[in-house]
Each structure stands twice: as C-alpha cells, then as structure tokens.
Image (cartoon, rainbow, N blue to C red):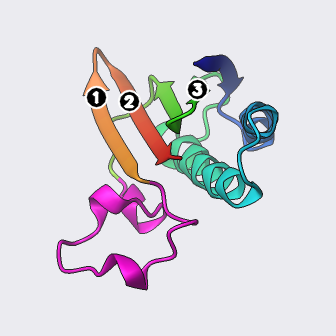
Amino acid sequence: MHSEAITIHATYDDILIPSAHLRELLTVHQISEDIIKSCETALNELLKQIIEYVCNGDIQKTITVNIACNASGVYIETQDEGNPVEFAVNKLIKAKNLQPASQDDSELDQEDMLDELWYELDTGKNIWQLVKYL
C-alpha cells in the first residue's frame, strides 16, 4: 500500500494541496480518470464542509489528510480538532453505504459514487473515512 499524509490549515486555498497529492498518487497507480475525479470531488466537498462548519473559518486550525491506495481501493481519511460535526455530509457526498435500502443501485452513477463514507468522533478529533473500491 502506498500512502501519504498531508496537514493543511483550514483555508479554502489549502484544499488544493491534498487534491494534488491525491491525483498524483492515483495517476502513478494508473487509476482511471473517472475514479480520480470522483475521489477528488468527494475530498474537496468534505474539506469545504470541515472548514466552514467544523473549524468555523479558523485558519489556525489544521486538518490532516491521509491518502492510501492499493490494488483493492483508494482510502482517504481526514482528522481535525474542530467542533463535532453537525452537518449531513451524505447530502453532499454520495456513498453506497449511505443510500436507502430501497434505492436501486442501477439508478445511481457508480463512477461518481464512493463505496463507503464513515465518521467518528474519537479523543476530541473528527475522523472521516472515504473509500472507493477498485
């Protein structure tokens, strides 16, 4: 498994840094452009929400982004010490594990959708995990 860890300040300009690292890592592993775009979009949307609602625009706060890739998937984790999450990220990021049981998978654009999205609050940190299986 190849991985990278990037720590950024909670600013909109810094969102581009982990996205560039994500794209580079996935390109090296010959991941399709569609999957790269879906992962970038999900990461960018999540970081925007963390900056706005969790860190409340406090640019002194930091967000750590861990990116890993292997033959079975792309794994992205973010950690921050902002306020506990109070927004419904499933409205912004589509993930199979968040779809209603009645939702027909054939109706959904599989390339744009992540496979899993998880959140936990652990030792004062918000931890998000985004997963796209290959």
- At 51% from the left edge and 76% from the top edge, which residue is drawn? 109
Seen in the picture, residue 20 relative to 105 is either above or below; the reply is above
Tell me the SS state at disc 1.
strand
- Furthest toward the front, the residue is 71
Front one among 45 and 67: 67
Tell me the SS state at disc 3.
strand
Residue identified by numbered label 1: 121
Q: Where in the figure is residue 58, as x and y percent of width and height?
A: 61, 32
Single out the mark in the foreground, 2 or 3: 3
Residue type indicated by callout 1: Leu
Residue identified by numbered label 3: 68
The verdict on residue 52 being magenta is no
Is tag 2's residue or tag 3's residue first in the polypeptide sequence? 3
Report whether 115 appears left or right of 34.
left
Seen in the picture, residue 132 relative to 112 is either above or below; the reply is above
Seen in the picture, residue 51 relative to 89 is either above or below; the reply is above
Residue identified by numbered label 2: 126
Rounded to the nearest whole Å, what is the CA distance between mark 1 and mark 3? 21 Å
Rounded to the nearest whole Å, what is the CA distance between mark 1 and mark 2? 5 Å
The verdict on residue 91 being magenta is yes
